[in-house]
Image: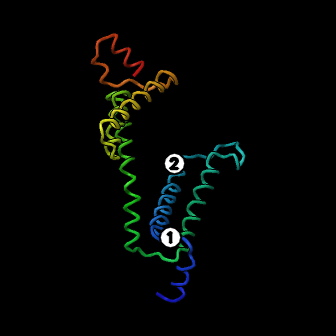
Amino acid sequence: MSKDRREEIRRFGAPLRGQALFAIVFVVASALLLSQLGNETRWAKGTEFFAQPRFWPAVSVIGMLLFGALHLWKLPRRGFERVDVAEWIIWFRAIEFVLWFLAYVWLVPILGYLPMTVVFMLILSWRLGYRSGKMLWIAAVFGFCVVVVFKSFLQVRIPGGAIYEYLPGALRSFFILNF
C-alpha cells in the first residue's frame, strides 16, 4: 500500500470495518430499486412534471444510487479484511429476528392472534436468555395483555385463526372476536 493511501485511510476519521460491504449493498439495492421504478410507478397524463407519481421516487432512488456510488468510490479502503467479516456476521445476526417475526406473521392467521402472541413472547424471551420461570410468566402475561389491549381497547381488527373453526359455536365466535 502506498504512503498516500495509508495517509488517506488515517484521515478518514471513521471506522473502516464494514464500510465496503455497506457501500456495495447500498449501491446494489439502489440499482435494484431503480430497475423496478418503471414497474412500480407511472407517468400520469395531464399532471404537472413535479406532481408526477414517478418523479419523486425517481429522484430519491437516483440520489441513493449516485451518493452510494460516490461513497464507494471515495472509500479509502475498498478491499475486504478480517474485521469486515466480523462486522458482517454482526449485521447478519439481526436477520434471525426478522425471520422470527415473519414466522409469527405467517402463523397468526393459522393459529390465532392470542396463542401465537403468547408463544412468540415465550420463544423470544427464551431466545434472549430470560429462562427463569418468573421471566417466562412475565412474557406470557405481557403477550396476553398486548392481545387484550389491541383487540378490546384499541379495537384492532385482526382475523381469527383458522384453528378457531374447530371450537364449538359460541366459543368460536368469542375467540374470533376477542382473541
Question: Which of pointers 1 and 2 lies earlier in the amino acid sequence?
Answer: 1
Which amino acid type corresponds to the residue marked 1 in the rendered image?
A: Pro
For the point 36% across and 61% down, the residue is 89
Residue that badge 1 annotates: 15
> Which quadrant would the C terminus be assigned to in this image?
top left
Residue 119 rendering spot, x and y as whole percentages: 32, 34
Picture quadrant where residue 44 is located: top right
Residue 102 rendering spot, x and y as whole percentages: 37, 41
Which amino acid type corresponds to the residue marked 2 in the rendered image?
A: Asn
The color scheme shown is rainbow
Residue 50 rendering spot, x and y as whole percentages: 70, 49
In this rendered view, identify the residue nearer to me: 6 or 160.
6
Q: Report the residue that reaches farthest toward the left.
A: 166
Q: Residues within 10 Å of mark 1 (few under 14, many from 20)?
A: few
Report helix, strand or loop for mark 1: loop
Residue 17 rendering spot, x and y as whole percentages: 45, 69
For the point 35% across and 43% down, the residue is 100
Q: Using the image, determine if residue 98 lies above or below residue 117.
A: below
